[in-house]
Image (cartoon, rainbow, N blue to C red):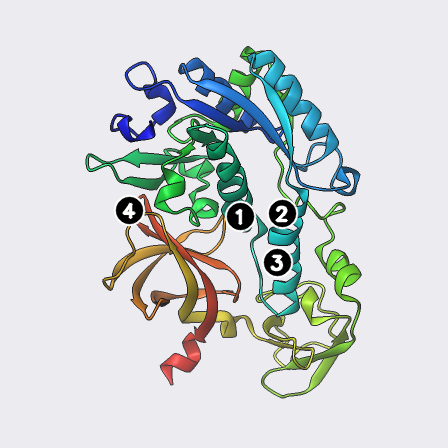
Amino acid sequence: MTENLPRTSRLPLAAPEGPRLRVLAAMSGGVDSAVAAARAVEAGHDVTGVHLALSANPQSFRTGARGCCTIEDSRDARRAADVIGIPFYVWDLAERFREDVVEDFISEYEAGRTPNPCLRCNEKIKFAALLDKALALGFDAVCTGHYATVVLNEDGTRELHRASDMAKDQSYVLGVLDEKQLAHALFPLGDTLTTKEEIRAEAEERGLAVAKKPDSHDICFIADGDTQGFLASRLGKAEGDIVDEASGEKVGTHDGAFGFTIGQRKGLRIGHPAPDGKPRYVLDISPVNNTVTVGPVEALDVSALTAIRPRWCGSAAAAPGTYTAQLRAHGGESEVFAELVDDELRVRFTEPVRGVAPGQAIVLYDGTRVVGSATIATTTRAAAAAV
């Protein structure tokens, strides 16, 4: 089926020359996924819409337009499917989402790391649980509204590339996909050199009521956007010390080390300023003794890191080489030298980068091609490396 697709980065638009695919369109209730589903239909594919119910109690998720998993979102997705003219279903993946995304999020923070739940959701839910079920039901591909492109090479292999419009590129959160998953992934918006306003205009022209719906931004399963409060309700408050790294002096207290991230400046509740009068930042989080260490911004500079659990978007990057790396969903690129040693990714930065936290994902790029991703385990400070 998908093996006979022509060489192109816009796979859904190739339907007139290639096979007509059975496509399962994941519809979040937002404008991007609705337009993606409509484009897949327009390209001639046999499309079915599905909304993922990710909470046993959807009202506990954010209401209104900022989330992606609420009752309102489900209704918006159904109305969009009706307008597009495709069958629509709601699939209950709440238990799998709780185990693989929510519980993972909590345990990572409890261990002093900073996870990205969107990457975990793409890896474990949208392109694992959902894709597995889709393939079992005879679908050829899963379609989403992500801004990224899949390129089919002449030898039959596939590559994940950045979106044509870097301002909307979402390849970072898709860096966990392997080649098998890419073989069944369609991203109809990825090759679109248009602004988000033009996507909204297209949705309005198609009669989709979600055309003016605001984008989702925050973590969907934290109803009020208060991450620290969410974690405290699950892990319990535990008072600990905030310590200045240089002097070793206790400069404040906190209600739980899990409530902090590396590089954090605000909300530290430090009683008095540093001797130099400059602000302090979180440098280290120790869940073992429930201590948060703070210091000057310069101490956040990182020159190297190690990362575990690498996942490759195609062949593994076995040979050492120079790449660019992205460390945050909306961050810039940094030049790095990376090598794989005993299934551990070792990375050196050409220029120090600031505020890198264990638990974050590092995604490697070769030009626009996504090479793969890994989870940051340890970092080496630039100051320490220079000694």
Measured as percent of width and height from the top left, residue 59 is found at 79, 38
Above or below, comparing residue 363 to residue 12 in the picture: below
Q: Position of residue 118 (x, y in %)?
A: 56, 47
Amino acid at dot 2:
Arg
Instruction: Quadrant for residue 57, please give it.
Output: top right
How many angstroms separate mark 2 from mark 3 (CA)? 11 Å
Q: Nearer the viewer, residue 219 or 183?
A: 183
Marks 2,1: beta carbons within 8 A: yes
Q: Residues within 10 Å of mark 1 (few under 14, many from 20)?
A: many
Q: Is residue 72 visible?
A: yes
Q: Which residue is mark 1?
A: 124
Rendering coords of residue 357 (x, y %) = 52, 65
According to the image, label 2 marks what residue? 96
Query: Considering only order in the chain, which callout, 1 or 2, is on the residue closer to the N terminus?
Result: 2
Task: Report helix, strand or loop for mark 4.
Answer: loop
Q: CA distance from mark 4 to mark 3?
A: 32 Å
Pick whichever of labels 2 and 4 is earlier in the sequence. 2
Residue occupying the far left of the picture = 154
Look at mark 4 in the image and give the residue it sits on.
Answer: 367
Between marks 2 and 4, how big is the CA–CA gap? 35 Å
Q: Secondary structure at mark 3?
A: helix
Give the image quarter of residue 245: bottom right
Residue neighbourhood size for the residue with mark 4, other residues' Cα within 10 Å, grouped as few (<14), some (14–19), many (≥20): few
Residue 180 shown left or right of residue 6 in the figure: right
